[in-house]
Image (cartoon, rainbow, N blue to C red):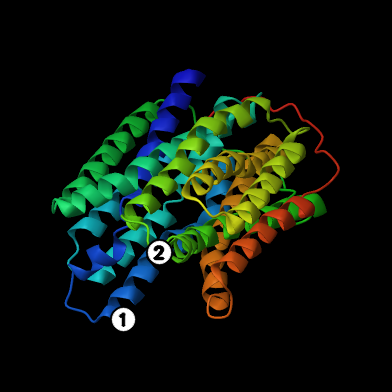
């Protein structure tokens, strides 16, 4: 399969899987309430568990999936991951109890599809991994923009199950297409080289910086809603404005991600990461002091554009310092660390919220971004030649 069409196929798969996973995000409590007769406290507990479930699956299996991609080739892992993800969607939408929803969401995370897609994207453009990762970030933004919107509209029309089944069907077709494409591919079996992650101080610092970035991003999802409700409590249509501002940030990420990726390489990764991280921190400190809605909108746009540089820069730095045969394990490890940050960020907000105002919470989230910039290794990662690996 030629490199460029293959990358386009991977981008479509990434956008579709993100759309499916994000479609339940804004309406999870409402959807859970339709499954079973429960008290409000039970609805909240099941909703929280279902929202966290995909991150748990990725946390536990991300590194193992990356190592499998190193050993067998990402092209052979992706059809399996797509199939597991599709099965998770089917269980999610056909089950009549919150436990089935939880199981389906766990399967979606355990598929570790994002790990395999990221590895394959790097392999299709091994000479410029930053460009490939930037486009993958844009595909994620497309899914994150369209998923919540379609999910909300589908639930309002009592068609959320149909939306999820449609996504599952498309993922199943993707599985069949990729499996057929790989049937005639030569077997790839190579012992993976020892990964630097776990033994290199620079790699550990990059993973810690990525952990802080993801914790900050998911803490911000909660804090921003609280801050907007506190600062603009009299604003008509507040929930609508919250959705618009959230979408605006993802739109900025969609546009900015490939631009960051165009300039990203192992020698520039740390510089771009610091620009993005300090930019996010500065936007949040300004957001805590903002008094008008147009200021909030502008800062959310800038925040989304700065955020687009972070994950891809950390990955470019990590894979630029290791043997190409072990980059799957590195990317898998980074995904597991990112999933841990997704879990820790909201927990941090929950712990601090009873004592801190939303402005102080925003400042705390800004400190997480600033700490990530400080923690990133100062010495530029040496650039390696990354030859294309067949998958």
Q: Secondary structure at mark 2?
A: loop
Local crowd size for mark 1, using a 10 Å CA cut-off: few (<14), some (14–19), many (≥20) = few
In the image, residue 11 above or below residue 102 = above
In the image, residue 149 above or below residue 170 = below
Residue 380 placement (x, y as % from top left): 83, 38
Residue 144 placement (x, y as % from top left): 40, 44
Asked if residue 60 can be seen in this view, the reply is: no
Asked if residue 89 can be seen in this view, the reply is: yes
Viewer-closest of 324 and 263: 263
194 sits to left or right of 13: right
Viewer-closest of 221 and 44: 221
Task: State how far apart marks 2 and 1 are (Cα).
Answer: 25 Å
- Mark on residue 384? none
Q: Residue furthest left?
A: 158
132 sits to left or right of 20: right
Residue 360 placement (x, y as % from top left): 62, 68
Instruction: State if disc 1 and disc 2 touch (CB < 8 Å).
Output: no
Residue at 45% over, 37% down: 251
Residue at 25% over, 70% down: 98
Residue receiving disc 2: 233
Mark 2 or 1, nearer chain start: 1
122 sits to left or right of 145: right
Quarter of the N terminus within the rendering: top left
198 sits to left or right of 297: right
Viewer-closest of 362 and 111: 362
- Mark on residue 41? 1
Viewer-closest of 59 and 35: 35
In the image, residue 159 above or below residue 316 = below
Residue at 46% over, 50% down: 112
């Amino acid at each position: 399969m030629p490199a460029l069409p293959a990358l386009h196929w991977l981008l479509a798969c990434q956008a579709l899987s993100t759309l499916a996973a994000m479609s339940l995000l804004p309406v999870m409590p409402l959807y859970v309430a339709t499954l079973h007769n429960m008290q409000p406290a039970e609805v909240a507990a099941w909703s929280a568990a279902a929202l966290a479930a995909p991150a748990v699956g990725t946390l536990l299996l991300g590194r193992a999936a990356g190592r499998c991609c190193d050993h067998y080739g990402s092209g052979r892992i992706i059809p399996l991951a797509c199939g597991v993800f599709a099965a998770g969607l089917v269980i999610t939408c056909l089950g009549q109890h919150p436990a089935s929803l939880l199981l389906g969401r766990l399967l979606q995370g355990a598929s570790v599809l994002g790990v395999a897609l990221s590895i394959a994207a790097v392999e299709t453009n091994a000479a410029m991994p930053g460009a490939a990762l930037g486009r993958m970030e844009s595909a994620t933004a497309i899914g994150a923009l369209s998923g919540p919107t379609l999910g909300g509209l589908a639930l309002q029309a009592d068609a959320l199950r149909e939306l999820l089944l449609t996504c599952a069907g498309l993922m199943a077709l993707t599985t069949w297409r990729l499996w057929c494409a790989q049937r005639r591919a030569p077997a790839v079996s190579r012992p993976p080289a020892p990964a630097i992650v776990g033994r290199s101080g620079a790699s550990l610092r990059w993973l810690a910086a990525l952990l802080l970035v993801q914790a900050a991003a998911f803490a911000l999802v909660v804090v921003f809603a609280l801050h907007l409700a506190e600062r603009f409590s009299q604003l008509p249509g507040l929930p609508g404005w919250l959705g618009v501002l959230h979408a605006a940030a993802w739109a900025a990420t969609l546009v900015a991600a490939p631009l960051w990726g165009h300039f990203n390489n192992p020698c520039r990764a740390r510089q771009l990461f610091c620009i993005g991280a300090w930019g996010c921190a500065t936007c949040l400190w300004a957001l805590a002091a903002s008094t008008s809605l147009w200021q909030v909108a502008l800062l959310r746009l800038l925040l989304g554009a700065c955020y687009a540089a972070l994950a891809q820069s950390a990955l470019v730095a990590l894979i630029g310092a290791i043997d190409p045969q072990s980059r799957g394990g590195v990317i898998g490890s980074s995904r597991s660390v990112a999933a841990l940050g997704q879990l820790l960020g909201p927990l941090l907000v929950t712990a601090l919220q009873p004592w801190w105002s939303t402005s102080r919470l925003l400042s705390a989230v800004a400190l997480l971004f600033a700490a990530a910039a400080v923690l990133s290794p100062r010495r530029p990662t040496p650039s390696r030649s990354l030859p294309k690996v067949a998958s």
